[in-house]
Image (tube, rainbow, N blue to C red):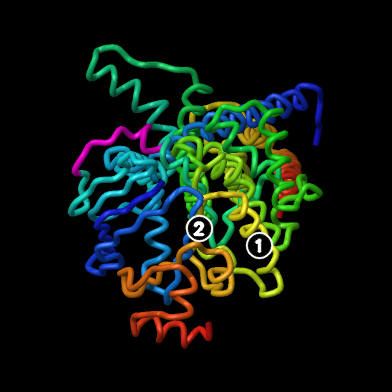
Amino acid sequence: MSLNINQVLLFAKGTLTTLELTFVSMLIGTFFGLIIALGRISKSKILEKTTWVYVWVFRGTPLLLQIMIVYLAIPLMTKEIFGDAVKMSRFAAASIALVLNTAAYLAEIFRAGILSIDKGQTEAAKALGMTRRQTMVKVIIPQTYRRVIPPYANEFIMILKDTSLVSAIGLAELYRASEKLSSSTADWRYLFIAAAIYLLLTSVATQVFAYFEKKFSVYI
Amino acid sequence: MIKGEHIDKFFGDLQVLNDINFEIKPSEVVCVIGPSGSGKSTLLRCLNHLERITSGKIYIDGELVDYRGNDKDLMKIEQHKVTELCMELGMVFQRFNLFPHKTALGNVTLSPMIVRGQNKEEAEENGRKMLEKVGLSDKADEYPSRLSGGQQQRVAIARALAMEPKIMLFDEPTSALDPELVGEVLEVMKKLALSGMTMMVVTHEMSFAKEVADRVIFMDEGIIVEEGPPSQIFGNPKKDRTKAFLARTNA
């Protein structure tokens, strides 16, 4: 197997794209996930129902299909309906699909975290004059960190690996880079290099989340 | 100071409060006793809107905070006014309900800062005073998980006091404690009573009621069966149900 500078660069660029996709979708997905989770436990029937439908749709269909819909179906659909295609870059389409998908999973993780906090906490906060919003922000959500980190780490690792699905729209992330190298050179080793890099990335992620879990457990 | 008129409370078909009328005057210490399920905790929880009454009226400081019939508001009372008046009630729970992610001092200062708008220094200075009041100055920086049940409950009392309530409500404050820890909590409550705080205490501690209460209310099956000074309730109860209850508790 040859690993010249060009091939190293291909791997590096692929890894970078994978990391970019992961961080973008997790950061934005966390934000939307939290909003959806709050919608799911909201007293408003409309919010509760719409967020339920959201989770139902994005958790109930394949991520690969969602990626293709954003990248392929939406431009065609908008062209047919409005006569003007909404086009976006591969990276944008991939990010949007990943955000939409992970937000649904994260919403359920956050909702479970919020519901796991004892009702007595809400009552104490209310008796101390806090509003619902203050109770959520200052009392409930900080207590969910520790409980939410393990499933959140799980989702992070899933997304990190699932970014490989965006190879379907031709984005040269880590998997696609290695796959192209392997098939063009008929050398199986490139795929194993990719596997090693994924394993390294997920291992680092595991360690980082373990650190935060410990940090948020000081009061236990 | 706080008054209830014709209070009914239903949970579904189950009536837990039945035409309750009572009044608590400034600096009065009232103990509410009665068997489990008699509605005494529910009554306390209705006063600061943790539960809503089905019908009746509640006044705090002469102002109406609840006027309901058939689970509906009969008079529109502005929410901010209700919140303000309810803040005159400090609540201490059976299971403490301290915020586990905050230190003792953090528990005591949180609400004064975000609800009363005090700055950190002000809240902490006042918070330390409150912890001193309950004898826990040295535990200010400990998390609740490192404190005994009795200490946790004293922090909970300090937390309620930090909001400068006019009335303190205690919902079976010693029921979740190991027997040897009950005394330190009752001691703090006794000091509070002597300092002139208005208090309504739901309790199973008959000796505390005997010693500290100005008045004792005996409740059973959602009604106030009998009320009067402790000497009368414990020494010379008039109703059979009161007698039977006291005989069971060996008071």
Report the residue at 66% width, 69% height from top.
B182
Say which residue label 2 marks: B29
Q: Front-most of B213 and B171?
A: B213
| Helix, strand or loop at mark 2 | strand
Say which residue label 1 marks: B185
Q: Is residue B180 left or right of residue A112?
A: right
| Helix, strand or loop at mark 1 | helix
Residue B215 % position (x, y): 46, 64
The answer to whether residue B75 is magenta is yes
The quadrant where residue B150 appears: bottom right
State whether residue A205 appears in this view: no
> Mark 2, residues whose alpha carbon is within 10 Å: few (<14), some, or many (≥20)?
many
- Mark 1 is on which residue type? Val
> Mark 1, residues whose alpha carbon is within 10 Å: few (<14), some, or many (≥20)?
many
How many dots with numbers? 2
State whether residue B12 appears in this view: yes
Report the residue at 41% width, 48% height from top.
B48
Q: Chain of mark 1?
A: B
Q: Chain of mark 2?
A: B
Residue range in magenta is B74-83
Q: Front-most of B245 and A7?
A: B245
- Mark 2 is on which residue type? Val
Q: First in sequence, mark 2 or 1: give its number.
A: 2
Select label 2 or label 1 by which is in front. 2
**Residue A209, numbered circle:** none
Residue B82 % position (x, y): 36, 38
Report the residue at 50% width, 22% height from top.
A92
Residue A154 % position (x, y): 61, 48
Report the residue at 80% width, 36% height from top.
A1
